[in-house]
Image (tube, rainbow, N blue to C red):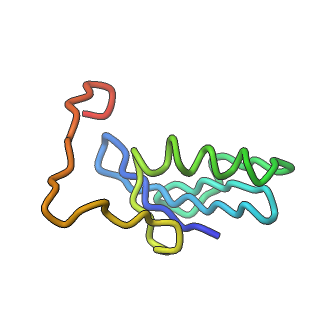
């Protein structure tokens, strides 16, 4: 299970709860209202969303799916993507 903080462009933070075992993703707004819910997904689908979307736009608060850095001396390359500005 992963808990993510998704910062919105209008300085609001949405909470995303993903559970690959149950195949669910829930998105809550800053008022703790359910904005989106997806159920019945496979473990691979949830992992794909976590790896290819949530790790880019959100911060993992649960810390269980973080990938360790490849090398300590290596600095990450930060891409300037106007979609996430």
Q: Is residue 12 left or right of residue 20?
A: left
Q: Position of residue 10 (x, y in %)?
A: 31, 42
Q: Residue at x 43, y 63 (%)?
A: 67
Q: Tell me the quadrant of the picture where the C terminus can be found.
A: top left
Count the labels in the image.
0
Q: Is residue 70 left or right of residue 1?
A: left
Q: Residue at x 31, y 40 (%)?
A: 9
Whether residue 64 is situated above or below residue 32 in the rendered picture: below
Q: Residue at x 65, y 70 (%)?
A: 1
Q: Is residue 63 left or right of residue 71?
A: right
| Residue closest to the far top | 82
Give the camera-side residue of 68 and 59.
68
Whether residue 52 is situated above or below residue 21 in the rendered picture: above
Q: Position of residue 33 (x, y in %)?
A: 61, 58
Give the camera-side residue of 33 and 9.
9
Q: Position of residue 71 (x, y in %)?
A: 24, 62
| Residue closest to the far right | 40
Whether residue 61 is situated above or below residue 58 in the rendered picture: below
Q: Residue at x 26, y 28 (%)?
A: 81
Q: Position of residue 68 (x, y in %)?
A: 37, 67
User: In terms of image quadrants, where is residue 69?
Assistant: bottom left
């Amino acid at each position: 299970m992963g808990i993510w903080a998704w910062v919105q462009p209008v300085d609001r933070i949405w909470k995303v709860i993903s559970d690959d075992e149950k195949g669910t993703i829930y998105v809550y707004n800053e008022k703790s209202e359910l904005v989106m819910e997806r159920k019945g997904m496979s473990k691979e689908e949830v992992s794909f969303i976590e790896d290819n979307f949530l790790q880019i736009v959100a911060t993992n608060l649960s810390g269980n799916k973080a990938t360790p850095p490849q090398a300590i001396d290596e600095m990450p390359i930060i891409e300037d993507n106007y979609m996430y500005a």
